[in-house]
Image (cartoon, rainbow, N blue to C red):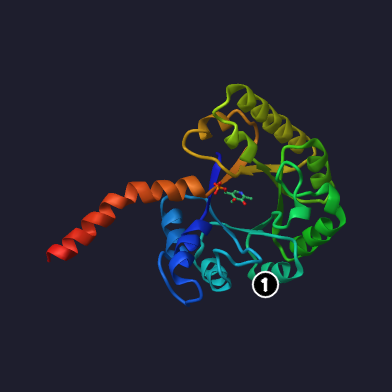
Amino acid sequence: MLKLGVNIDHVATLREARYRGGAHGEPDPVTAAQICEAAGAHGITIHLREDRRHIQDRDVWKIREAVRTRLNFEMANTPEIVAIALKLKPEIVCLVPERRQEVTTEGGLDVAGNEFAITETRRRLNDAGIEVSLFIAPDQAQIAAAARTGSQFIELHTGAFAEHFADPIARAAELARLVAGAQQARSLGLRVNAGHGLNYVNLPTLHRVPDLEELNIGHSILSRAITTGLATAVKDMLALMAA
Ligand code: PXP
């Protein structure tokens, strides 16, 4: 069965918009993680960015404690964040690019250009009992390099597929690249996840990509939560005002 990891970074984005620098504030990513799990999500994904633009260090530890399913920790391959991951012990780390030089032309991690450093981090994380995934474009050279690093998973970058979804020709081309990428990865012994830009419209088409294990989805789920939850929030406030 295809699994869902919910990326809750944007819960923290909203909190930081009002409470940056404070020790508290709403909405709380820990509560969000618990709601996602109670609703059936198979995992929770968070990205501790070097610039701490959304998830903060304190969130990471509280979320680690609260998560009962599987914590997927997205991170750049930098000494500071690797040290945090080794202490945090998420079930899985997904290495993602944050700086321009780590990014391929197609937006995924440049594994081929950073093979040695990624292999070393992969080894240290695996030695600590943490599985490793690499967020890469469906590109032959990157997938081959990902296999050489010894990583357990790749996460195929679905950003181009999502971006071109409205154009049938470009959509078919992007879908074909994802299918070929998944097949190549499986043939090299890699397990395959996917994510970025997936939503309620493009998701059914993605089912044509074989062998996907888990999708990591954030923006569209949180956007829908706002629109579907807004009426209740307004009614709750009106009830308080009337009391
Ligand atoms: N996968 C990875 C590696 C990501 O960095 C992100 C967030 O950009 C996602 C999945 C989720 O993307 P989205 O918020 O567009 O669903």
Total numbered badges shown on the rendered structure: 1
State whether residue 42 is above or below residue 128: above
Q: Can residue 158 be seen here?
A: no
Q: Quadrant of residue 64?
A: bottom right
Q: Quadrant of residue 45?
A: bottom right
Q: Quadrant of residue 131?
A: bottom right
State which quarter of the image contains the C terminus. Answer: bottom left
Left or right: 188 in relation to 220 = right
Q: Position of residue 84 (x, y in %)?
A: 67, 71
The furthest residue to the bottom: 23
State whether residue 99 is above or below residue 85: above
**Element carrying mark 1:** helix
Left or right: 132 in relation to 141 = left
| Residue at 76% from the left image edge and 46% from the top image edge | 104
Instruction: Indicate the amino acid at tag 1.
Output: Lys
Residue receiving disc 1: 87
State which quarter of the image contains the N terminus. Answer: top right
Q: Position of residue 57 (x, y in %)?
A: 58, 72
